[in-house]
C-alpha cells in the first residue's frame, strides 16, 4: 500500500491559493499543543493563511504546567505579530478540563506511548478543533502535532480527515516535520527562548519509561 506524503498534499493546496500576501486568504483554525511545536508551523502557514491558534490541551495533567505552556504560546504569537511575519495571527484558548482527557483515556492507562491512548487524545483535541472551527466559519482546521517525530502523522491525518466529514470543515493535511520542520522549530525555540517541556503533558507520558 502506498504511503501518503501529507507534506505534498499540503503543498498542492497552498499552490492553489492566491499566493503570499494575496487576498482573500483562507482561514485556518490551528490546534496547537505548545509554543515550540507551533513555532515553525505558524511561521510557515502565516504566509498563506489567516491563522487562529486554538490552544486546547486538556491532556496536560498539572494546572501550573498548563498555564506555563499557554503563556508561552501567547508570548510567541505576540512576537510574531510584532515582526509581521505574514498575515496576522490570533489565539483562542479552549477550556482547561483535564477530566475530559481522563474520560477518553479510561481503560488505556497502561498503554505505551504512541498507542491507542494517544490516538484517543488526538481525537479528543482535534474533535473540539473541528467543532469550533466549523461553528465559526473557518475554511480549514489543522494541528501542529505532526511536527513532532514522536507523533504519527498518518494517524493524525486519518483522524482529521474523518472529523472533516463529520463537521463539514476541510482538513488541512500536514506532516510538518518534513523539510526539516522539526529542526526549524528547535531553532525558533532557541531564538525566542521558549520553554521546551520534556513530556507530552499527560501524567502517563511523564512516567520515566515513557519520557522521550
Image: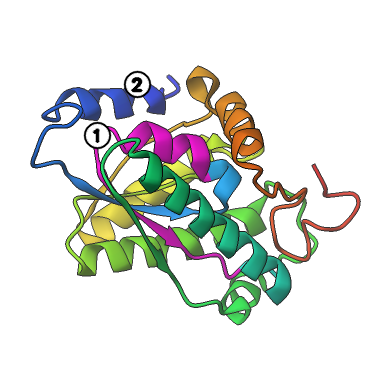
Q: Secondary structure at mark 1?
A: loop
Mark 2 is surrounded, within 10 Å at the Cα level, by few (under 14), some (14 to 19) or many (20 or more) other residues, namely some
Left or right: 192 as drawn, with respect to 208 = left
On the question of residue 149 being in view, the answer is: no
Q: Are marks 1 and 2 in contact (CB under 8 Å)?
A: no
Q: Nearer the viewer, residue 116 or 133?
A: 133
Q: Which residue is mark 1?
A: 48
Between the residue at mark 1 and the residue at mark 2, the CA separation in whole angstroms equals 15 Å
Left or right: 80 as drawn, with respect to 133 = right
Left or right: 126 as drawn, with respect to 152 = left
Left or right: 6 as drawn, with respect to 187 = left
Q: Residue at x 52, y 55 (%)?
A: 75
Q: Quadrant of residue 90?
A: bottom left
| Mark closest to the chain's N terminus, 1 or 2 | 2
Confirm whether the magenta stretch covers residue 127. Answer: no
Q: Residue at x 17, y 31 (%)?
A: 21
Residue 208 x/y as whole percent: 91, 52
Mark 1 is surrounded, within 10 Å at the Cα level, by few (under 14), some (14 to 19) or many (20 or more) other residues, namely many
Q: Quadrant of residue 172?
A: top left
Q: Residue at x 75, y 52 (%)?
A: 199
Residue 12 x/y as whole percent: 24, 23
Q: Secondary structure at mark 2?
A: helix
Q: Which residue is mark 2?
A: 8
Residue 27 x/y as whole percent: 22, 49
What colour scheme governs how the chains and residues are painted in the rendered image of this protein? Answer: rainbow
Residues in magenta, as a range: 38-58
On the question of residue 182 being in view, the answer is: yes
Q: Which dot, 1 or 2, sits closer to the camera?
A: 1
Amino acid at each position: 500500500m502506498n504511503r501518503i506524503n501529507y507534506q505534498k498534499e499540503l503543498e498542492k493546496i497552498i499552490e492553489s491559493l492566491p499566493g503570499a500576501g494575496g487576498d482573500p486568504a483562507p482561514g485556518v483554525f490551528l490546534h496547537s499543543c505548545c509554543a515550540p511545536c507551533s513555532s515553525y508551523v505558524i511561521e510557515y502557514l502565516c504566509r498563506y493563511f489567516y491563522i487562529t491558534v486554538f490552544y486546547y490541551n486538556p491532556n496536560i495533567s498539572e494546572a501550573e504546567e498548563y498555564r506555563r505552556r499557554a503563556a508561552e504560546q501567547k508570548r510567541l504569537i505576540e512576537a510574531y505579530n510584532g515582526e509581521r511575519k505574514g498575515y496576522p495571527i490570533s489565539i483562542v484558548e479552549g477550556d482547561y478540563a483535564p477530566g475530559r482527557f481522563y474520560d477518553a483515556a479510561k481503560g488505556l492507562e497502561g498503554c505505551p506511548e504512541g498507542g491507542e491512548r494517544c490516538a484517543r487524545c488526538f481525537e479528543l483535541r482535534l474533535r473540539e478543533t473541528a467543532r469550533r472551527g466549523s461553528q465559526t466559519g473557518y475554511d480549514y482546521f489543522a494541528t501542529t502535532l505532526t511536527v513532532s517525530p514522536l507523533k504519527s502523522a498518518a494517524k493524525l491525518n486519518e483522524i482529521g480527515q474523518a472529523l472533516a466529514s463529520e463537521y463539514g470543515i476541510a482538513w488541512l493535511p500536514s506532516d510538518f516535520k518534513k523539510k526539516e520542520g522539526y529542526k526549524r522549530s528547535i531553532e525558533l525555540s532557541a531564538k525566542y527562548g521558549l520553554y521546551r517541556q520534556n513530556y507530552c503533558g499527560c501524567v502517563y507520558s511523564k512516567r520515566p519509561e515513557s519520557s522521550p
